[in-house]
Amino acid sequence: MPTAPTADPAADPAASAPADPAEAEEFVRAQTAVGAVPFVPEVRLHLAEEAIGLWERTESAKGEIGLPPPFWGFAWAGGQAVARYVLDHPESVAGRSVLDLASGSGLVGIACALRGAAGVTAAEIDPYAVAAIGLNARANGVPIAAHCADLLDGDGAPAEVVLAGDVFYERAMALRVLPFLQRARARGALVLVGDPGRAYLPREHFTEVASYRVPVVADLEDAPVKTSVVWRLTG
C-alpha cells in the first residue's frame, strides 16, 4: 500500500474539511469513474485509476502535505474480502444494525445494505471519504448514514455488527482499533475484520472464517492479487 506518515485518528476531522459537502462530492466525482468492484461485482463504486496521482491532487486541493492516502478512492483487499463474505453470508447482517468502521469508500456498508441490514452507519475521519460514501450509496440505491467522526474511544453501540476492512496497517492505528473492537465484542456485537496480511493484526485474538484471493490496483500493494482473510474477533 502507499507509504504515508501515521495518521492521527483522534485529530479533529473538521480541521481539514472542504468548504462544504457539495465541494467534496464534486472533487470525488472529478477524480473517479463509476465501475464494478472486481471481486464484488454486485457493488459499483466511484473508483480512481491510480493512487499516487490522486494522493497528490488531494493534497493540492486541501493545501496540505503529508496527508494519509485517499483510502476512499479504491476497493482495498481487506474491504473486498469482508464485502464478499457478507454478500455470500447474508445471515450475518440481515435484520441487524451495522457499523462499518474506517469505511473508506463505503464498500462494506453497501454490501450489508444490499443483504438486508436493518441500518448501516459508516464512520470515517476524512471528509472526502464521507462524500465518497454518500455518492457510492446512491450509486447502489441503498441508504447509508455516513459520519465524519472518530469513534475509537467508544464501543460502537448500538450496532449489533461491527465490521472493518483493513485497519491494522499501522501500529498506532492498531493500538486504538483493537480495544475498540474488544469493547464492541464485550457488549455482544459480532465483530468481523478483513485483512490481507498486515503486520499489526493481532491474530491471537481472532478466528478465521473465510479466505479469498482478491485482485487489487497495482500501485496499492506489493502484488496484483492478495490473499485476504475475514477474521471474527473472539471473546
Image (cartoon, rainbow, N blue to C red):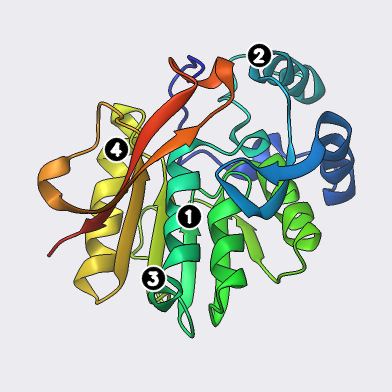
Which is nearer the eye, 17 or 121?
A: 121
Label 4 secondary element: helix
> In the rendering, at what x and y percent does residue 101 appear?
46, 54
The residue located at (74%, 53%) in the rendering is: 136
Which residue is tagged 3? 161
- Residue 108 shows up from this direction: yes
Residue that appears at 49% across and 59% down: 100
Q: Badge 4 is on which residue?
A: 174
* Residue position for label 2: 52
Above or below 39: residue 219 = above
Which amino acid type corresponds to the residue marked 3 in the rendered image? Answer: Val
Whichever of labels 4 and 1 marks the residue nearer the N terminus, that label is 1
Mark 1 residue type:
Arg
Q: Taking 123 as reference, is 154 left or right?
A: left
Q: Residue 13's x, y, as percent? A: 61, 43
Which amino acid type is marked by label 2? Ile
- Disc assigned to residue 84: 1
Q: CA distance from mark 4 to mark 1?
A: 23 Å
Label 4 is placed on what type of residue? Ala
Q: Secondary structure at mark 2?
A: helix
Which residue is located at x 65 percent, y 60 percent? Answer: 146
Q: What is the C-alpha distance between the residues marked 2 and 3?
A: 33 Å
First reached walking from the N terminus: tag 2 or tag 3:
2
In primary-sequence order, the first of circles 1 and 2 is 2
